[in-house]
Amino acid sequence: MADDDTDFLPGDGPSSGVSVSLTAGTLQAIRERVGKRGVSAYLEKAAQRQIERDHLDELIADFDKVNGPADPEAVAAKRAKLTGTASSAAGAAA
């Protein structure tokens, strides 16, 4: 069992067993992807991705508090530049 006084980053430290409840359909979909023996590793990676998303959401919220929300047209233009697709804002301006 892990020492409760030790801080670990997501993905680090010893493994610890927990019980989780999933709907039958979700569990079936996971097992179809990774097999019965891959469920724990799949859920570990999924939890790590969720933690990363939560941290990103917190960073965005903090940024918005300081700077205000991002300009939707500027975001669309940057997205179009990154993806190489025409944005609706850029298409309307052309």
Image (cartoon, rainbow, N blue to C red):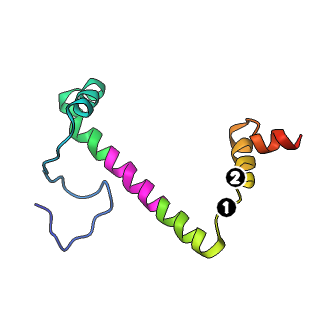
Residue bearing mark 1: 70
Residue at 29% x, 39% y: name it. 42
Residue bearing mark 2: 75
Where is the N terminus found, in terms of image quarters?
Answer: bottom left
Foreground: 46 or 12?
46
Quarter assignment of residue 66 = bottom right
Give the residue at the far right of this rendering: 94
Give the image location of residue 11, x and y in percent. 31, 53
Quarter assignment of residue 13 = bottom left
Q: Residues within 10 Å of mark 1 (few under 14, many from 20)?
A: few
Q: Are marks 2 and 1 in contact (CB under 8 Å)?
A: yes
Magenta residues span 46-56
Report the side of 3 relative to 72 (left or right).
left
Q: Which mark is residue 83?
A: none
Main SS, magenta region, reads helix
Give the image location of residue 16, x and y in percent. 15, 54
Foreground: 23 or 6?
23
Label 2 secondary element: helix
Give the residue at the far left of this rendering: 1
**Amino acid type, mark 2:** Val
Q: Residues within 10 Å of mark 2 (few under 14, many from 20)?
A: few
Quarter assignment of residue 60 = bottom right
Report the side of 56 relative to 10 (left or right).
right
Give the image location of residue 18, x and y in percent. 14, 51
Give the image location of residue 14, x and y in percent. 19, 56
